[in-house]
Image: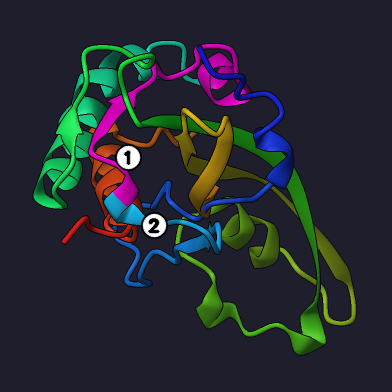
Amino acid sequence: MMNTRNLGSVGLVIWVLGVGGCATATKVDFEVDPNLDPLRYQSYYMLPIPTESSLEHRFPDLVKTLAPLAERSVDAVMIAKGYAPAASAEAADLVILIHGELTPKSQVLLDQSFHPSNVRPGSTMDSALNSRNPGVTHRYDYDAGTLFIEVHDVAADRMVWVAWTERELEKLERPPAERVAGNITRLLEGFPARE
């Protein structure tokens, strides 16, 4: 089995865990190994989604619910791009690793330079600013949910492609597994096809 620890040093972030009702398109970022040649690869295998992460600690059953949806999303995209599923990671040319993290973040806002139309109604930021005083700064604490999809070349034992997305999550918000699976599809659509 390939070593994914040394490949994770890229340390990239993803904007995928979308919030329902938000009109903003999900921002997807990615990096590609300049030597990536899709014609060199024929098969892929999706590794099990890791269960030890800050995301899984906050949503204990998310991986169990998400895993079959993620696998269907990966299969649909990769087969459409000309890749065949392999029976194991050892038999595959590429392995796909999907993982997510929650990172606590803070934002400091000055009342004079902040326009309240940028705040979602009912959000914790909205509540914090409803009791504001002019000239006062406000600290807004939230979690940034990040979804990563890494594609590794098994023979070379290196990451050849990574996509990520990050989204603000309210403290009590739970991202639906179906939305996360849809975001997995959007991320993986950026991987090059064999044709």
Q: Check the picture and name the quadrant holding the C terminus.
A: bottom left
Q: Pointer 2: what residue?
A: 37
Q: Is residue 91 above or below residue 124?
A: above
Three-letter code, disc 1:
Val
Q: Residue at x 30, y 42 (%)?
A: 41
Q: Spatial distance from mark 2 to mark 1, Cα to Cα?
A: 28 Å
Provide residue 166's location: percent of width, then percent of height: 54, 53
Provide residue 147's location: percent of width, then percent of height: 49, 42
Three-letter code, disc 2:
Asp
Density class for disc 2 (Cα within 10 Å; few <14, some 14-19, many ≥20) is few
Q: Residue at x 59, y 37 (%)?
A: 158
Provide residue 155's location: percent of width, then percent of height: 48, 29
Q: Which residues are magenta?
A: 40-58
Q: Residue at x 47, y 19 (%)?
A: 59
- Mark 2 and 1 residues: CB-CB less than 8 Å, in contact? no
Q: Pointer 1: what residue?
A: 180
User: Secondary structure beneath disc 2?
Assistant: loop
Res 73 quadrant in image? top left
